Image (cartoon, rainbow, N blue to C red):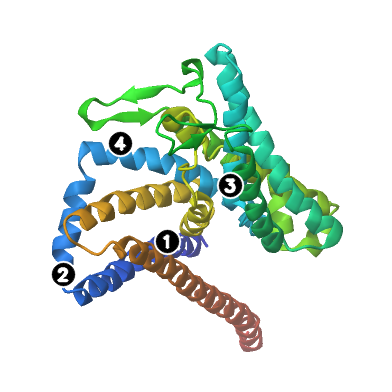
Amino acid sequence: MKKLTSRIDRERLLLAVAAPVLAVVAALVVTALVIAVTGKNPFDAFNDMLSYGSASDSQVYILNKATTYYLAGVAVAIGFRMNLFNIGVDGQYRIAAFFAAVVGGTLDLPGIVQIPVIIIVAMLVGAMWAGIAGVLKTSRGVSEVISTIMLNSIATAIIGYLIQPERLGQLDEAGTLVSTRPLPESSWFFTIDMGPAGLLWGFLVVAVLAGLAYWFVLGRTRFGFDLRAVGQSESAAAASGVSVKRMVVTSMILSGGMAGLIGMPTLLNESHMYSNDFPLGIGFTGIAIALLGRNHPIGIALAALLWGYLERTTNHLEVIGYDKEILGVLQGVIVLCVVIAYELVRRYGLRRQQQRVGAELAAQAAQPAKTEKLEVAG
């Protein structure tokens, strides 16, 4: 029995490792073919990516980007664990960052008070904006995909209306940048000086804490068990006494609250204001990162680092003469390869499990027959 258990554990470990390895190999092969079709040497491109990505300034850049991407991945993953597709993370983090910047720009409190106020405002706004989709789904049966897409557009319109100079925004001296009032220096989040490599954003610490909270709540609490149970089977969860509607709304609120943190690294560590050049599309990037990370906190972290690495190195490839579309090709190919690889490995693992169960049943059926023959012979 111990040997069988040990063999099953080894097979599970091999399958867990095989999926990402297969995906990476397939992605490299497809990307190499795409680069070769453009008339460039793929090996030279990969060599440049390795050397440029390992530079100290690139590592700081990758960590800073990964901080934002990780928060986006976790925000999406919370919905995925409930079998909800929160495609509105993009609008949730932008409207949260906007109102957090407005509140932060009007206050002038000590940093130990003002920074938490800004973060709490962002999380509350994000949670409220995502909660609308949850309420619509449970009360009117509106798909969260449709409602969150529409809420993205509404968030864009609200921000565009309120950021006008005659309302909550202001125009810079050059007349080209519209933004909220800058945050006072007391509300700037701390940074770590890495010398010539640049400044490492201190919000990385908050991202790590958010990941730990995500792991603990969803993996080590009754609430997390109920949430995952509803995601697996609503009818089974309801039969066990779980309120499905309450869990849907709660998970959307939690996802939106996490989405509210996405814009905080940029707001508190870099721009210190919300302007018309604030980063866009990070919510959609979070969908890809959550898929790559399989909704696991460590997997999401690795996916966020990979995304930051690809962004940094492929942008450099454009500088040295490669086509700028390579980044999009790389990202798309990696996502497709990961999804396909995990599905292939899952099906193989399921087939192996069925074979083991069949063999075990055959052995159990053969045992009584063998005992009966021995009794007859005796």
**Relative to 195, residue 108 above or below:** above
Mark 4: few, some, or many residues within 10 Å (few <14, many ≥20)? some
Tell which circle, 3 or 4, labels the residue nearer the N-terminal end. 4
Q: Residue at x 52, y 47 (%)?
A: 72
Residue 228, x across and y down, in percent: 68, 54
Tell which circle, 4 or 2, labels the residue nearer the N-terminal end. 2
Q: Which residue is mark 3?
A: 75
Q: Which residue is mark 4?
A: 60
Residue 258, x across and y down, in percent: 60, 41
- Depth check, mark 1 against mark 2: the one in front is 2
Tell which circle, 1 or 2, labels the residue nearer the N-terminal end. 1
Locate residue 173 relative to residue 80 in the image: left or right.
left
Q: Which residue is mark 1?
A: 10
Amino acid type, label 3: Ala
Q: Residue at x 19, y 47 (%)?
A: 52
**What secondary structure is found at the residue carrying circle 1?**
helix
Q: Residue at x 61, y 43 (%)?
A: 159
Q: Are marks 4 and 1 in contact (CB under 8 Å)?
A: no
**Relative to 278, residue 228 above or below:** below
Residues under labels 4 and 2: Cα distance?
A: 29 Å
Amino acid type, label 4: Val
Q: Which mark is residue 40?
A: 2
Mark 2: few, some, or many residues within 10 Å (few <14, many ≥20)? some
Q: Which quadrant holds residue 174?
A: top left
**Relative to 72, residue 28 above or below:** below
Front in this rendered view, residue 234 or 166: 166
